[in-house]
Image (cartoon, rainbow, N blue to C red):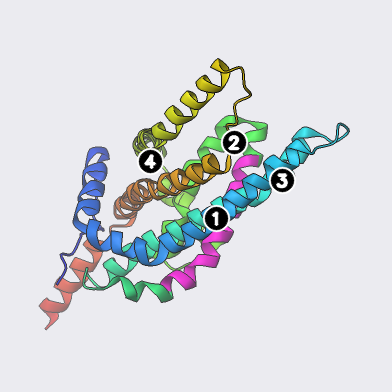
């Protein structure tokens, strides 16, 4: 029997981070197997599509007529890449939070193969959540940066509410505003720390490509040649690195989920109430 992780617990700022890493260490092998089954095949397919999309964009830019608007042209051609990225985050979120939900319901005693029905059920809902919240954050950021940041933090809680409480998108969005009340700055700080971890990891995995590109450019300039930076090999390597960078987003998802459970305990104390109810039943017996 696999060890059970206690999700529903009040945690302070530091404990949220420590327990998030504890969960990652405890579930590393089984979660890794889950990624191999559900996430990696989709990411490989999306990586191929991303390379094709980027090559199509570069080819179109080279053949762009002088009268076309560069900004509008680039935006339209880049839309497929944005959609692929949203799909990647949707699949990753569905798997990570579906995994945590199954862990919670079965007290850690489950196999990765049991996750499939849940991933299918919540995948479409999550895609709509990501697409809708992305548009709302962009619109808010256009008018003022601060509302965009505020909404970005609040909406990070929408996916865990959607999955762990099994509610609709509208209810999940309203609920996120409710449970984060008086704890926005703490949640913001946790997301920043998790984001810095992911950012540092992204730089590390990108270093080989950055160094290779710099050397290639240097040699081309030294030989008085035009550097061919965006080659097929570059785009393939860039897509592979992008897969690892997206996978690292798991850290942020887990940090946010652990914070979500802590906020719910602070606001509503469901675990404490459950213990009281159980004690009352035992006394009545």
Q: Is the C-beta separation of discs 1 and 4 under 8 Å?
A: no
Toward the front, the furthest residue is 223
Instruction: Report how far apart the C-alphas of labels 3 and 1 lie in the structure.
Output: 16 Å
Q: Residue 141 appears at what percent x and percent y?
A: 62, 35
Task: Give the mark nearest the N terminus, 2 or 1.
Answer: 1
| Residue assigned mark 4 | 187
Q: Is the C-beta separation of discs 2 and 1 under 8 Å?
A: no
Q: Is the C-beta separation of discs 2 and 4 under 8 Å?
A: no
Disc 2: CA contacts within 10 A as few (<14), some (14-19) or many (>=20): some
Label 1: which secondary element: helix
Q: What is the number of the mark on residue 48?
A: 1
Task: Give the mark nearest the N terminus, 1 or 4.
Answer: 1
Task: Give the mark nearest the N terminus, 2 or 3.
Answer: 3
Q: Is residue 281 above or below residue 186?
A: below
Q: Quadrant of the C terminus?
A: bottom left
Instruction: Report how far apart the C-alphas of labels 2 and 3 lie in the structure.
Output: 16 Å
Disc 4: CA contacts within 10 A as few (<14), some (14-19) or many (>=20): many
| Residue stretch in magenta | 118-138
Toward the right, the furthest residue is 67
Task: Give the mark nearest the N terminus, 3 or 4.
Answer: 3
Q: Quadrant of the N terminus?
A: bottom left
| Residue assigned mark 2 | 230
**Looking at the image, can residue 135 be seen?**
no
């Amino acid at each position: 029997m696999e060890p059970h992780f206690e999700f529903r617990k009040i945690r302070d700022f530091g404990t949220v981070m420590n327990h998030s890493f504890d969960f990652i260490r405890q579930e590393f092998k089984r979660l890794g197997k889950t990624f191999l089954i559900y996430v990696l095949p989709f990411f490989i397919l999306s990586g191929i599509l991303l390379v094709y999309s980027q090559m199509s964009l570069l080819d179109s830019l080279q053949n762009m007529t002088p009268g076309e608007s560069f900004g509008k042209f680039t935006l339209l051609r880049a839309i497929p890449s944005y959609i692929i990225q949203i799909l990647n985050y949707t699949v990753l979120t569905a798997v990570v939070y579906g995994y945590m939900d199954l862990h919670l319901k079965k007290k850690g005693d489950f196999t990765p193969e049991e996750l499939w029905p849940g991933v299918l059920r919540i995948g479409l809902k999550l895609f709509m959540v990501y697409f809708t919240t992305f548009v709302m954050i962009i619109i808010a950021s256009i008018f003022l940066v601060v509302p965009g940041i505020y909404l970005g933090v609040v909406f990070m809680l929408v996916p865990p509410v959607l999955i762990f409480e099994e509610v609709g998108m509208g209810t999940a969005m309203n609920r996120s505003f409710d449970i984060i009340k008086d704890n926005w700055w703490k949640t913001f700080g946790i997301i920043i720390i998790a984001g810095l971890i992911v950012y540092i990891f992204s730089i590390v995995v990108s270093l080989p490509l950055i160094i290779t590109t710099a050397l290639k450019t240097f040699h081309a300039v030294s030989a008085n040649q035009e550097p061919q930076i965006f080659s097929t090999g570059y785009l393939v390597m860039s897509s592979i690195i992008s897969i690892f960078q997206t996978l690292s987003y798991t850290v942020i998802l887990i940090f946010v989920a652990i914070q979500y459970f802590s906020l719910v305990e602070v606001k509503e104390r469901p675990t404490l109430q459950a213990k009281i109810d159980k004690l009352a039943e035992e006394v009545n017996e």
